[in-house]
Amino acid sequence: MKIETNVLDDHQAKLRVEFDTDQLMDAKQRAARKIARQTKIPGFRPGKAPYGIVLRTVGEGVILEEAMEILVDEQYPHIIDESKIKPYGPGQLENVISMDPPIFEFIVPLEAEVTLGDYSAIRIPYELPQVMDEEVNKVLSDLQNRQAVLEPVERPSQEGDQVFIRLSGERTEPVEGESSTLVTDRPMPVIITADEESSPNEWPFPGFSRSLIGLSAGDQKSIPHTFADNADFENLRGQAASFSITVETVKSRKLPDLNDDFAHLIGEHETLDALRNEIRSSLETERKEEYDADFNDKIADELFKIASWKYPPQMISHEIELFQDQLENRLAQQNMDLSTYLKIRQLDEAGLKDEIRPLAEQRMKRTLLLLEIARQQDIKVTEEELQSESMRTLDQLSHMLPPDKVRKTLTDEFVRGMIGNIGADLLIKRTWDHLHTVVQGESSGIVNQDAPEEKPKSKRTKKKDIEA
């Protein structure tokens, strides 16, 4: 068997393989026996018809097609080994150049290659913002407001009240083809907040609740508003609108005192200070997670400037499919299917893939970077760590799911996939931890040259992946 290897620009290998004539003849003999077992040939028991009879019965083409499949299926692993390439996935029989001698041409996607560059010189300061007392107090205030006691009042509304209204709204100058309706007779409760507590995300516009001050049950009011050019709602920026409200009821809100009894009510805390400490701890954890995610993005941006990648088109196609699967799962949680989503977005599936591609490619490159750093630094996850984290996750799932769904959900396939994902997550986290020490100057980031290089394994091409 003679093999010529040519690496293409798209990081696939074109393999020109010349087989021995005897190999093809042997494959044809075996193909004829297989066909004889599967085809009813008069005068012969299944599998007993000689080659010449099978040839006259089914024709040279049928035997040759079966022989080629047998030959390729059997020899493909040896082809990969002898060519010394590192395949990303199954290859394809691209062309049959000759049958005498038998010369086949294969296209094989290659394993991605990443050149990291010298990332040891990257420096990014890590400055985690502290949780301030005001932030803790804000959470306490929100908890206090949720426990407010509402009482109907026979007076005009004032700051701090909760007003129940019916709201309608429309554009005053809609453009052609644009609906004028924004809101149609929507019931909603509104808490009249202080000026300093107004939120830029308030619906339908910031400061709306303040316009309800002085209204009583049964009152009606029309409120004109022009949305700012930087409004959160992009489709309303710069547009003029008119909102009509009808007040149904006005209720005062009596807030509970912030004391130890309140702490017991919220979460069985012994004291208000204990509740404050838990809030602070929760905010600190949330703050660190958000900051670390942003910090990781900054590191990735710097790595992208000095790294280069080579990968086959099949790899990005696979990543796009993963992105789409994740989108479909999110839509299913919202009781929506992909078809409906595409109609709303006025997209077809090809357009969706084009939209997904840049994000999928960026995520794939980022993952390849981290895995290459982990390989070079010999960063690993121990069996004990993986087992411990997997057991903890399984325990959480067992408590979250109803008993009748535990066995149906936690199948062997699900558990294997879960363990694989946990292992990948732990490895990625450990690699980010390493990069944190490097960019803060605490580690040199020097590659571990002593780490043994794992011998690549050949991936056998399945019949369905071979196209004549």
Image (tube, grey):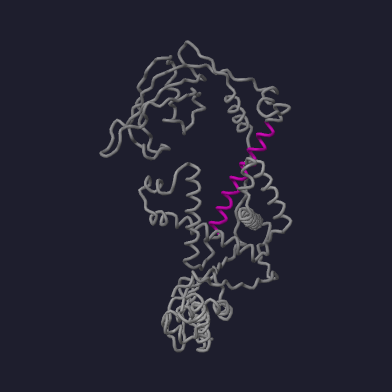
For residue 306, above or below residue 194 = below
Left or right of residue 274, residue 290 in this image: left
Frontmost residue, 152 versus 260:
152
For residue 395, above or below residue 382 = above
Whether the magenta-drawn stretch holds residue 463 is answered as no
| Image position, residue 118 (x, y; %) | 59, 65
Frontmost residue, 366 versus 422:
422
For residue 53, above or below residue 465 = below
| Image position, residue 86 (x, y; %) | 57, 73
Judged from this view, the residue extending furthest toward the left is: 176
| Image position, residue 101 (x, y; %) | 46, 89
Quadrant where the N terminus sits is bottom right
- In magenta, the rendered stretch is 276-302
Seen at 57% across and 24% down, the residue is 145
Res. 87 in view: yes
Frontmost residue, 33 versus 430:
33
Whether the magenta-drawn stretch holds residue 282 is answered as yes
Res. 440 in view: no
Quadrant where the C terminus sits is bottom left
Left or right of residue 243, residue 145 in this image: right
- SS majority, magenta: helix
Seen at 43% across and 21% down, the residue is 165
Left or right of residue 40, residue 277 in this image: right
